[in-house]
Image (spheres, helix red, strand yellow):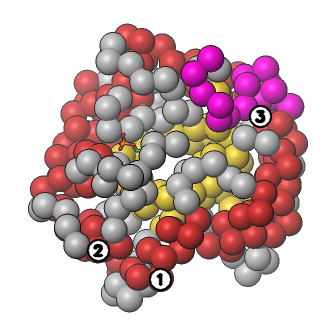
Amino acid sequence: MPTVKNPAARLAAVQARIKAAAERFQRRPDSILLLAASKAQSADAVAALAVAGQQRFGENYLQEALDKMQATSVLEPRRQLEWHFIGPVQTNKTRRIAEQFAWVHSVDRYKIAQRLSEQRPPSLEPLNICLQVNISEETSKHGLPLSELATVAQAVAALPRLRLRGLMAVPAPSEDFAEQRQAFAAVRQAQEALNRSASLGLDTLSLGMSADLEAAIAEGSTLVRVGTALFGPRPSKAKLD
Ligand SMILES: *Cc1c(COP(=O)(O)O)cnc(C)c1O
């Protein structure tokens, strides 16, 4: 099985990118969390990055995530991992997701949130939620249209077993920094508007991936979801969903 080449060096390089961007845009580096997006990577690769010090991992597919949780549960206690679900949430998967994850970034309908709240075990802390918004409607099928955001956000914030933390988005890819920033700015502004009008106290902007994390940090991202830059290219059968 191929393992990650020098995971500690890759992790240090991504942390250095985050720190440099934070300094450039006058942010505190510790206000930006790093989530390792580990879809299609092996449990060994996840474990290697965990041993190098990475704690938060994001997965897109439930079964694949459960397998890696099992495989990495033998890590020593101080390496216990925090799992975030970042892929499309199917109705029939909500129970296991509510049981196994600390965060879900990809909630795009009230119905899904309602099920996650009902199914979150009482023994666990409330499930942290980001609403995924669609800011590139012509190119993406995922995410809430901005026009529905305020209504859905207020309803989700009222669910008892969830903690609505903020917004997530995956803009259409662009190589142009100004264009990347513009997409992220739209999400930040939507969040600011919600906090003003509905006092939701949202504190999380889940924005930025390997290719655009600097632009996301410029626009206020508090959590970047990074795959390729941490693990190298995904094995080819993987899809970016
Ligand atoms: C795969 C994925 C990422 C990471 O993408 P990279 O370009 O490999 O950094 C981030 N967020 C989501 C939702 C993903 O599916």
Please report the bounds of the magenta region as a residue range. Answer: 138-151
Is 41 magenta? The answer is no
Mark 1 C-beta to ligand 1 under 8 Å:
no
From the image, state whether disc 3 or disc 2 is nearer to you. 2
Mark 3, residue position = 199
Q: CA distance from mark 1 to mark 3?
A: 39 Å
**Residue in the picture at 48% in, 35% down:** 207
Q: CA distance from mark 1 to mark 2?
A: 12 Å
**Residue in the picture at 64% in, 20% down:** 137
From the viewer's perspective, is residue 145 above or below residue 31?
above
> As drawn, is 122 to the left or to the right of 64?
right
Taking the image in four quarters, ligand 1 sits in the one at top left
Query: Identity of the amino acid at label 2?
Result: Asp
The answer to whether marks 1 and 2 mark residues whose Cβ atoms lie closer than 8 Å is no
Mark 2, residue position = 44
Query: Identity of the amino acid at label 3?
Result: Ser
> As drawn, is 236 to the left or to the right of 87?
left
Q: Earlier in the sequence, mark 1 or mark 3?
A: 1
Q: Quadrant of residue 8?
A: bottom left
From the image, state whether disc 1 or disc 3 is nearer to you. 1
Classify mark 2: helix, strand or loop. helix
> As drawn, is 99 to the left or to the right of 38?
right
**Residue in the picture at 56% in, 33% down:** 169
Mark 1, residue position = 70
Measuring from the top left, give residue 22's x and y in whole percent: 30, 33
Q: CA distance from mark 3 to mark 2?
A: 43 Å
Mark 3 C-beta to ligand 1 under 8 Å:
no
